[in-house]
Image (cartoon, rainbow, N blue to C red):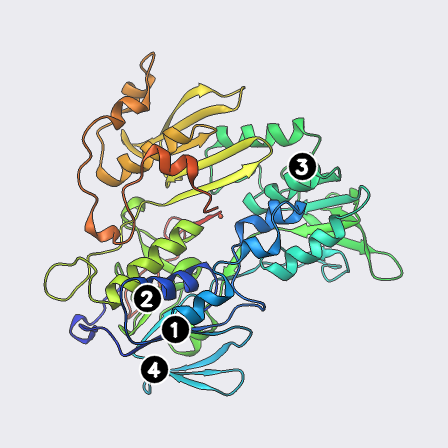
Amino acid sequence: MAPQVDRQAAPRTAPHAVVVVGAGQAGVETAAALRARGFQGRVTLIGGEPPGPCHRPPLSKGYLTGDVPAADIALRPAEFFAAQDIDLLAGDRVVSIDRERHTVTLDSGLRVPYGALVLATGCRPRTLPVPGASLDGVSTLRGLADAEDLRRRLDGPPRRLVVVGAGFIGLEVAATARGLGHEVTVVEAQARALARALTPGMADRLVAEHRAQGVRVLLNQEVAALYGDDEGRVQAVELGGGRRIDADLVVVGVGVLPDTALATAAELLVGDGVVVDERLRTSDPDVYAVGDCARFPSPHAAGRHLRLESVQNATDQAKYVAAALCGNGNGDGDGESAPYTAVPWFWSEQYALRLQIAGLTADHDETVTVGDRDGGRFSVFCFREERLIGVESVNRPADHGIARRLLTTGTDLSPDTVRQPGFDLKNLARRPAAPASASTSAATTPSASDASSSTASNAPTHASAPRRNSAERQTVHV
C-alpha cells in the first residue's frame, strides 16, 4: 500500500528555508538544483566528512590506482557553495529533528530552522559479525577516508588481499587491486556473484573475467573468523569449513544499511530506509527523503517500494525534490507535483568491461542475449510477461542509451523481435520518441550518446509498518 500523506497539509508554495541533511551525492545535488531552479530562500547543507562532499564511484577504481587525484573527486569545487549562497556545514552533523518547531540541532549545539527538510543521510557499510573483524588491515570502503587508507596500503609491493562480498564494490576493488599486481581472492556467501543485481548469465560472465585475470573467486563460502598476528594485524581469513586463506588486507563489501537514526528518533515512518510516497515525501509532508536512504514506490518495479543505491537515483531524486519545492514540479495544476518515475540506470567498470544497466531486471521471466558474449560485447534483454523491463549491456553503450529511452517513453519490443537474425536496437531508436513524462522532472530522455559519455558511476501506509516480503524489500546496489 502507498503511504497516505495528508495532501491538505502538503506545502503549496516554496518554503522560506530548506535544510538538507547529508552532504553526499543526493544532498549536494538537492542544494545545487534548488539554486539552479531559482530558489531564493536560505539553503543549508549539513554533514559529510571534511574536506567536503566527494564523488564516490572513483573511490573503488581510479582513486585507488592514483589515476584520479583527490581534487577531481569533489562533487563541487569549494568555492561553488559560497558562490551559490549555500551554507555548507561540513564536518558537523544533525543529532535531532524537532518537527513541531521546524528546527534541527547539530552536534555543535547549533539550531537551524527549516521550512522544508530533505533527508539525504545515505547508508553505512555492514561489518562482518565474526571474531577478528576489528583487526588492523580490515576495512570497508564507503568514504574518502576509507579510500585513502586502502590506497596507502595498496601502494607498494604485491600483497594478499581478500575481498569479502562479490557485489559491485567488492568486484571493482578486486579488479583494481589485481590491476596493481596484488594477489586477490574474493569470497562470496551466495551461490553466485551479484545475485540481487544481475541476471545469472551476466554475473557469470563477470566472474569468468575475474578468474581469467587471475583472481580467485570462491562462491557459496562464508567467513567464520579473521586471525591476526601479535601486533593485531590481520593475517588470515577462515572460512566456514575451516579452510584458511592468507591475507595482508581484507576489504569487506557485504552491503550497506540505510541511515535511518534521525528519522526513527523523529518518529517518521521507516522500514529498510526512510519510507516516502510517490512524491518522495515522508509521513511528515514538510520532510522529504532522497538517495540511498529513501524507500520509495517505483513504477519500474510494479509499484513495489524499494531503495536504489546509485548515482542516477540520488541525482534524479534530488532534482525532483528541488523542482517540487520551487513549485515547478510539472504537476496536475492543483499544487501537486507529478509522481517520481525516473528510469533507474547503473554502471560498473571492471578491467576492460563496462557494464551498464537500464531498468530493473530482478523480476524478469525471460531473457534474450544479443552480441558477442565471449568477446565481451553483448546485451541481455530482460522481459516480464513479454514486456521489456531492463537491459544489461557490456561494452555496448548505444544499446544502453536506447534502452533507457525506450523504458522512459514505452515500447512494444518483444522477445521474439529481439531473437530475429540481424536485430539491431538502433533501428528502434529511429522511431519518433514520445515526450518524456513530466514526472521524471529533471531527468531527460536519454540517447545513445548520453550513455557513451556518461561517467556518473550500486512502503506501506503511514499507519502501519511496511510489508516485509522479499519482493517488497528489494534493494539494488551499485
The answer to whether 186 appears left or right of 277 in the picture is right
* Image location (x, y in percent) of residue 217: 66, 35
Q: CA distance from mark 1 to mark 2?
A: 8 Å
Q: Earlier in the sequence, mark 1 or mark 2?
A: 2
Ranked by sequence position, the earlier of labels 4 and 3 is 4
- Residue flagged by tag 2: what amino acid is it? Arg
Going by the numbered disc 3, the residue's amino acid type is: Leu
Q: Find residue 218 and name its label.
A: 3
Disc 3 vs disc 2: Cβ atoms closer than 8 Å? no
**What residue is pinned by disc 4?**
99
Hey, what amino acid is under mark 4? Arg
Q: Secondary structure at mark 1?
A: loop
Compared to residue 42, the image places residue 415 above or below, namely above
Q: Which residue is mark 2?
A: 35
Residue, disc 1:
85
**Label 1 with label 2: CB-CB less than 8 Å:** yes
Would you identify the image quadrant in which residue 209 lies? top right
Q: Where in the figure is residue 399, as x and y percent of width and height?
A: 37, 29
Mark pair 4, 3: CA separation:
49 Å
Residue 440 visible in the current orientation: yes
How many marks overall?
4
Q: Earlier in the sequence, mark 3 or mark 2?
A: 2
In terms of depth relative to the viewer, which is nearer, 31 or 395?
A: 31
Task: Report whether residue 192 is seen.
Answer: no
Looking at the rendered image, the disc whose residue lies closer to the viewer, 4 or 1, is 1
